[in-house]
Structure formats: C-alpha cells, structure tokens
Image (cartoon, rainbow, N blue to C red):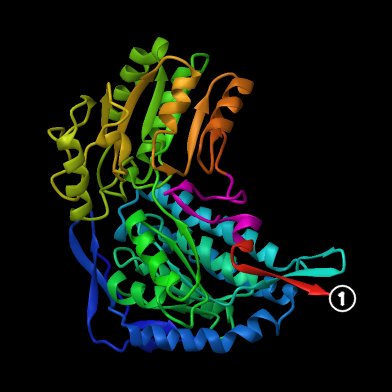
C-alpha cells in the first residue's frame, strides 16, 4: 500500500516545519493500517499562520482587482483539476469511499464549486445606492476554516473557495482523520502561485489547533462544519471576542413519500441517498416517511434494495458501500443499532460484513417510533428508519419533529409535493428527485447551523456590509 507522509504545514506560501515534532497517523479504514502521517500542529503554528494571513490580507483584498482574483482562482482550479484522480485515490485510502463515488463526488463536486467561485470572484464588487448611502460589500478579513472528515475536499473548497473569492485570507484545519487531501489543495495553491499567506494549512487535533483557531484574536471569522456539540463550543469561543461564526452542523433529514408518489423510485433513490458515503453524509435522508397505503410495499422494497448493496474494498468496482471512517465510528453506529427496538428488515448486527475493515451492514428499521433515538439522533452510518403516516399534516409534523433542519425530500404530484416542501423547517428540500445544486444556498435551520455555503450566498457569508453616506 502506498505510504503518504507529510511533515510540514503550508504557511506563508511555503512548507514549513511544525513547532511540534509529534505526528498524527492516518489510517486506511479498509485495511486498518496506518499508511501516512501529518504534523500534530500547535497554537504556535496557528499564530504563525494567522500572522501570514494578516500580512497578506490587504494585498489580496484591496491590492488586486476582482478580475485578478478571479484569474488566480482559475489557475487554482486548473491545478486542482490536474490532481483529480489523485484526490479520488487519497480519499479512497483515508476515508474508504468507493472509487466511482470518490471520482464523481469527492473530486468532481468540489471542482465544480471552485469553478463557480473563480467566476464569482471575477465579477465587479457588489454595490448599491440607498438614498444618500453607497452600500459596499467588503471581505470580512482573516478566516479560520475547520472542516470535517466525511467530504474532505468538498467541505474545504466550500469554505476556502468562497472566502478567497470574497477577498479574505484563510487558515485551514482539516480533520485529523482525513487530512491528506488538503495537502493536494496546498500543492495546487503552490502551482497556481497564489500570493504567500493567502491560503495556509495547519494540521492537528481539534483541542490543539481547532481551539486555537476558534479563540484566536487575529481571526475575524470562523467557518466550521461538524458536530453540533463542537459547533456550540466554537460559538462560545468566538463569542468571547465577538467574532462571526458560520456553522454547518448535523442533520436528520426526512424523505416524505406521499400517497400519490412514484413509490418505487422514491424508495430506491431514498435508500441510495441514505447510504451514500456509507451513510456518513449530513444531508442523508435517514428517516423515510411513507403513507400508510404504500407502507408495506416501501418496507419490502427498501429491505431488498439495501440487501443488494455490495460491501468491500473501495478500489473494487463492484463495491457500493465502503467502510466507516474509523473504529470509533463503527462502534458508535453499532451502538445505535444495538439499542434500537424497532423491527430490523435488512442488515443488523448479525448481518455478514467483510472480516477486514470498519464495516457496518446497511440496516433498515421498520415500524420506527418518531420519538425514538434512531429517529431523532444523527447516526452517521448506513442506518435507515421507516415511519408511517396517515395524511400530509401528519407527515409534516413528523418531518419537523427534529432538533435538526438541514435537508429533506418530498415525492408526490408536483403541486402537492411543493406545498409540503414549503412547510418543512429545513434548509433544502428535493422534490421528486430534484438534483443537488452546487450553486444554490446550502445550510440549515435549528441545530443544523448558522449561515449558508455555496454560490453567491456562500460568498456573501464572508463579507461585511458598509454604508458610505454622501
């Protein structure tokens, strides 16, 4: 197996040694072997990165025209595109995403997002006149970006691309579970010759590097994606110095299948969505709500679909579901399955899985109590709960019975499905299989977060608004 060892951070336009000699091992969740390492960064490394980002800010924000910033991001996009196959390979190694999905989603999607930000960066600065006021939008400053392990390049680009397009400079801390993909971005930054200090990469743990970023007085904004608990801690740290935060947190999305829906399509697409990336997706439709008239059919079809998914080596073309990201994540998911009291119709703890790797069989529960743990908590694994309902009002009530509100879906006749979608308290809803739009605003209600990512709304998140009276 290929070994990937990175011993330095990317700070101020160069790879520099860490203040610490400690290293964090990177495990392949399929082979369960450590195949690489990255520096265990410290608060001192964060200080150095903040100084570099602060020194670069004025030149990047105000010394370049929008066209020049857009051209720089265009060069970055080309350099990263040249590394697309390597991105997919590294994600397969450090996360276990099957190669076909890694190429399309883990590598392809962030390239689409970055191309969009290169185009947005090149547009003239947004201004408007209100009475005697000229209203301008300016970059917020130095941004600390803390990203999760489940989509290690997409979640990075959603923050870094938007922040750079807005004119900000960035310090990135990727997850210590999947940090190697971020180095491919740093390599692309070097090739694209972005000005030194505009983008900085510091690897390390949350308690060491993440906390230092969240509480650093030289960082104007923190953008975080991850658990709701960690998001709350980051909010507290930033609040102490009145810094802006943008949070994309957990989800427990409902897939609502109405009485007049195409049940076969709704169930098959719904199962695929719930199990994408081994269920390690914040937007996963993990609650399938089905009208009583189609309930038995939906349960049978969901169970059959789940049972047909092949688990195995991420680099085997036949593999549909790879391992979970870590042994701890596997144990966590198995704990939810073990405690559940609903009826298991597919998978479960006794279902066969590969002997090697952090696998959990794709599991489907039927007759799930909407208030039960598996219907309320984000499991982050291949676990689907099926819940019946009697009418549209009950479906909406069950769907909204969650502390989260990130995504969801509705299936039925178009007008009826849209009417139900409007009533869901969630940041995004797909109607009848509507595809994901990487240029539309993405974010959540309630404990799913604060702020929006992607497209023009994502760029605006990294800007301040100023009124100039004349």
Q: Is residue 38 above or below residue 178?
A: below
Q: Which residues are magenta?
A: 437-458
Q: In the picture, which quadrant includes the C terminus? A: bottom right
Residue 71's place in the image compared with 394, above or below, is below
The stretch drawn in magenta includes residue 283: no
SS category of the residue bearing label 1: loop
Per the image, the residue denoted by label 1 is: 470
Q: Is residue 215 left or right of residue 380?
A: right
Residue shown at the point (33%, 13%) measured from the top left: 296
Judge whether residue 12 can be spotted in this image: no
Quarter of the figure with residue 321: top left
- Relative horizontal placement of residue 326, taking residue 122 as reference (left or right): left
Q: Position of residue 291 (x, y in %)?
A: 42, 16
The crowding category of the residue bearing disc 1, from other C-alpha atoms within 10 Å (few below 14, some 14 to 19, many at least 20), is: few
Q: Main secondary structure of the magenta part?
A: loop
Q: Position of residue 463 (x, y in %)?
A: 63, 68
Observer able to see residue 104 = yes
Magenta span has 447? yes
Instruction: Place residue 167 in its image quadrant.
Output: bottom right
Which residue of the protein is positioned furthest toward the top in this rendering?
Answer: 293
Image height of 339 relative to 176, above or below: above
Nearest the viewer among 147 and 25 is 147
Residue in view at x 53 percent, y 36 percent? 429
Q: Position of residue 202 (x, y in %)?
A: 38, 78
Query: What residue appears at the point 42 percent right and 69 percent down from the top-left corner?
Result: 182
The picture places residue 130, in percent across and down from the top left corner, at: 83, 63
Please name whichever residue, 400 or 427, is drawn nearer the observer in this view of the structure.
400
The one nearer the camera, 322 or 436, is 436
The N terminus - image quarter = bottom left
Residue 59 located left or right of residue 87: right
């Amino acid at each position: 197996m290929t070994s990937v060892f990175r011993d330095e951070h990317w700070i101020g336009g160069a790879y520099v040694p860490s203040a610490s000699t400690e290293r964090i091992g990177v495990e392949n969740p399929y082979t369960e072997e450590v195949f690489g390492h990255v520096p265990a960064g410290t608060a001192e490394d964060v200080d150095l990165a903040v100084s570099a980002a602060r020194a670069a800010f004025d030149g990047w924000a105000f010394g370049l025209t929008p066209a020049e910033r857009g051209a720089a991001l265009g060069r970055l996009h080309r350099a990263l595109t040249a590394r697309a196959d390597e991105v997919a390979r590294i994600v397969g190694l450090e996360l276990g995403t099957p190669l076909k999905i890694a190429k399309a989603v883990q590598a392809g999607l962030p390239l689409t997002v970055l191309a969009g930000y290169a185009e947005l960066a090149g547009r003239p600065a947004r201004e408007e006149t209100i009475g005697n006021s000229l209203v301008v939008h300016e970059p917020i400053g130095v941004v600390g970006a803390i990203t999760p392990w489940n989509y290690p390049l997409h979640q990075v680009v959603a923050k870094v691309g938007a922040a750079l397009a807005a004119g900000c400079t960035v310090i990135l801390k990727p997850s210590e579970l999947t940090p190697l993909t971020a180095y491919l971005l740093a390599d692309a930054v070097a090739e694209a010759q972005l000005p030194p200090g505009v983008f900085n990469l510091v690897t390390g743990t949350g308690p060491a590097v993440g906390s230092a970023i969240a509480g650093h007085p030289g960082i104007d904004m923190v953008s975080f994606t991850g658990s709701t608990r960690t998001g709350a801690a980051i909010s507290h740290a930033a609040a102490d110095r009145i810094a802006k935060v943008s949070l994309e947190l957990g989800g427990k999305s409902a897939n609502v299948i109405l009485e007049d829906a195409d049940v076969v399509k709704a169930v098959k697409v719904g199962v695929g969505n719930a199990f994408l990336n081994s269920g390690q997706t914040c937007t996963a439709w993990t609650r399938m709500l089905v009208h009583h008239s189609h309930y038995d059919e939906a349960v049978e079809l969901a169970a059959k679909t789940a049972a047909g998914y092949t688990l195995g080596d991420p680099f085997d073309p036949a593999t549909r579901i790879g391992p979970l990201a870590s042994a701890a994540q596997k144990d966590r998911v198995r704990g939810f399955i073990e405690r559940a009291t609903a009826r298991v119709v597919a998978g479960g703890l006794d279902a066969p899985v590969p002997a090697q790797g952090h696998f959990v069989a794709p599991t489907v529960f039927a007759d799930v109590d909407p208030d039960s743990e598996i219907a309320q908590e984000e499991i982050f694994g291949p676990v689907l709960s099926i819940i019946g309902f009697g009418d549209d009002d009950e479906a909406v009530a069950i769907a909204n019975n969650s502390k989260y509100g990130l995504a969801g879906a509705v299936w039925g006749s178009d007008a009826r499905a849209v009417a139900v979608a409007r009533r869901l308290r969630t940041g995004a809803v797909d109607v009848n299989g509507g595809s994901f739009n990487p240029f539309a605003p993405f974010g959540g209600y309630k404990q799913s977060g604060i702020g929006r990512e992607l497209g023009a709304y994502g760029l605006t998140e990294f800007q301040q608004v100023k009124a100039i009276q004349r």
